[in-house]
Amino acid sequence: MSEPGQQVAVPCPACSPDLETAHEVLSSGGGGQTLTVRCAECGHTHKATIEEERTVERDVIVSQEGESFSTRVEAPADEVVAVGEEFIVDTEEALMTVRITSLEVGDERRAERAPASEVETFWTRAVDNVQVPVTLNPRDGRRDETRSLKLLLPGDHEFVVGATETFGDEEFTVKSIRLRHDARGYDHDQLRHRGDAAIAKDVKRLYADDETSDAWSAW
């Protein structure tokens, strides 16, 4: 609801009837939608009708490293939301960026996209910091044995096929990147060509050659 002293953008019948310009709200009436405003360009005072945006409050389920919790979010009722989009939720602990993984639209039905007014629950996962599973193959190839590790990283950390990564005592060269189903902007579900890149929050699993110096020293 617009209050006296606030700025709104509306056409001015005196100087800009076809263009919205800045106006100062002088008073409101009619449930806050009919305003008396003064044009900042020419000083003309007139009435203006402002359509207040309708919002809805919806449940949000946030998944984070194997655990989940619920919160609420307010969204414009007519805004179309889709799997893969991100938004910020305000939790008791902190502000958190989440990505939509599924939309529940009623009768336990799921949708890839829908107006916010039709969504009953947003299913999401936290993407500020994410856990990335890595499958490591022996670098000498003498045995078809592998080992696995999990890395906790900022969601925007970039991995590149062919690049060597070092995390503490671990070192490996990325061979391919399996992407999550909610990742957007990629041509394939798995990246295999040298130079292909993806950020950590889009990665389902990395496959890499183990470069750790003593990883296979017992062989």
Image (tube, rainbow, N blue to C red):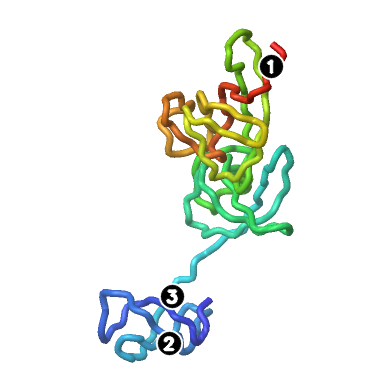
Q: Residue type at mark 3?
A: Ile
How far from the left and from the top, in percent, is residue 2?
A: 50, 79
Which quarter of the figure has residue 106? top right
Disc nearest the viewer among 1 and 2: 1
Gap in angstroms between the C-alphas marked 3 and 2? 11 Å
- Looking at the rendered structure, the secondary structure element under dot 1 is loop
Gap in angstroms between the C-alphas marked 1 and 2? 80 Å
Residue 123 visible within the image? no
Residue 172, relative to residue 12: is it above or below?
A: above
Foreground of the two, 190 or 91:
190
Gap in angstroms between the C-alphas marked 1 and 3? 73 Å
Q: Residues within 10 Å of mark 2 (few under 14, many from 20)?
A: some
How far from the left and from the top, in percent, is residue 5?
A: 49, 86
Residue drawn at x 65%, y 30% is 170
The first of marks 3 and 2 along the sequence is 2
Residue drawn at x 49%, y 31% is 163
Q: Residue type at mark 1?
A: Ser
From the viewer's perspective, tell me whether residue 157 is left or right of residue 59: left
Q: Residues within 10 Å of mark 3 (few under 14, many from 20)?
A: some
From the viewer's perspective, tell me whether residue 161 is left or right of residue 97: left
Q: In this figure, which residue is indicated by the disc labeled 1?
A: 217
Residue 219, relative to residue 183: is it above or below?
A: above
Q: Residue type at mark 2?
A: Thr
Q: In this figure, which residue is indicated by the disc labeled 2?
A: 36
- Looking at the rendered structure, the secondary structure element under dot 2 is strand
Callout 1–callout 3 Cβ contact below 8 Å = no
The first of marks 1 and 3 along the sequence is 3
Q: In this figure, which residue is indicated by the disc labeled 3?
A: 50
Q: Residues within 10 Å of mark 1 (few under 14, many from 20)?
A: few
Residue 71 visible within the image? yes
Callout 1–callout 2 Cβ contact below 8 Å = no
